[in-house]
Image: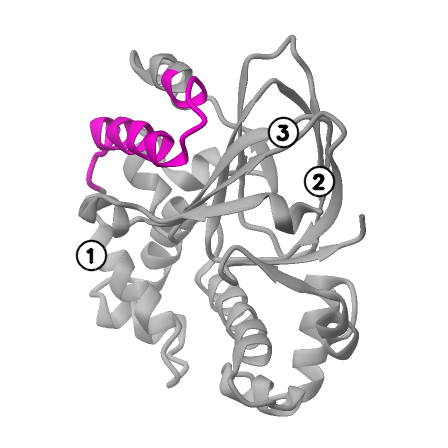
Amino acid sequence: MIKEQLQIHYPKDPLLQQYIAYYYFLNTTADFYSHYFSFPNTITSFNIHKNVNARITAQRITVSHDLTNQYLAILQGKYKQPLEVELSGRMDKVTIGFKPLGLGHFMDRHYGDVATNTSQIFTEWDGECNYHNMLDAFFGTDDLNRRVSVLEKYLLQIYRPVPADNLLEEALALLTDERNFSTLAIAEQLNQSERTFNRLFRKHMGLSPNVYRIISRFRKSMEVKLFSENFISLTEACYRSGFYDQAYFNKLYQKATGSNPRRFFREVASFADNHLIFKVTE
């Protein structure tokens, strides 16, 4: 089972803690197999594998062991429907969970220009002189603390501030505010035209402000329902996460998870200190 194989670590460097939520590692035996669905998230999953190949379609990614490929980085962009994932054979990988604006601080191009699909092969670091040396050192040890140190040293070398970061952070806070500001009101508060704000947001986030707000509320409703200390109903989870129309809430879950909320919460499980919520089928 994938749950027993996952090991989670957290950023050590204070600067990286601003941009990265967690790392999780998966290191398995040759007969490993897992098939699961993941769901829309504001966290960006960035995966670095050793010895695999990948087949990628719109809402599915299949990763299998392949000794002919040394390293492969896969970036999952923003998506609004379930993502089907199949892993087979020996897996040795790290997933970096970048916070909403995180990855943009570690590459030259804007996130929205790089993450154009639900999943894609990531090559932005291939030209960095220390990238392959980092990979050799990273996969050359089985000590996970050492792996974190090697990875963080590299990330700090390629870190570059995003000029619009403060404005975008304020925009994210306003989009998730309970007062439900319109995008026009948010743009005005940021001294931007609505058109300029939408364009800037898409460039750095890969999706529109309204879609980000919906995904953020969807994730909040999942967490409220799954992790509240006391049992709460679906109706209460709906209202606590900023949805005030039960019919819309149900419709959103059907699109984002492939099933209605009641069935969804019976089928999913959480992993890695509750940071990951998957529907595992195998």
> Separation of disc 1 and disc 3 at Cα?
38 Å
Q: For the residue carrying disc 2, how many other residues have a C-alpha within 10 Å: few (<14), some (14-19), or many (20+)? A: few
The residue most toward the top is: 68
Where's residue 237, x and y in %?
A: 58, 85
The residue closer to the viewer here, 143 or 276, is: 143
Q: Earlier in the sequence, mark 1 or mark 3?
A: 3
Q: Based on the picture, tell me whether residue 152 belongs to the magenta stretch.
A: yes
Check disc 1 and give the amino acid type. Asn
User: Could you tell me which secondary element the residue under label 3 belongs to?
Assistant: loop
Q: For the residue carrying disc 1, how many other residues have a C-alpha within 10 Å: few (<14), some (14-19), or many (20+)? A: few
Disc marking residue 166: 1
Q: Which residue is mark 3?
A: 91
Q: For the residue carrying disc 3, how many other residues have a C-alpha within 10 Å: few (<14), some (14-19), or many (20+)? A: many
Where's residue 214, x and y in %?
A: 53, 69
User: Could you tell me which secondary element the residue under label 1 belongs to?
Assistant: helix
Where's residue 64, x and y in %?
A: 71, 26
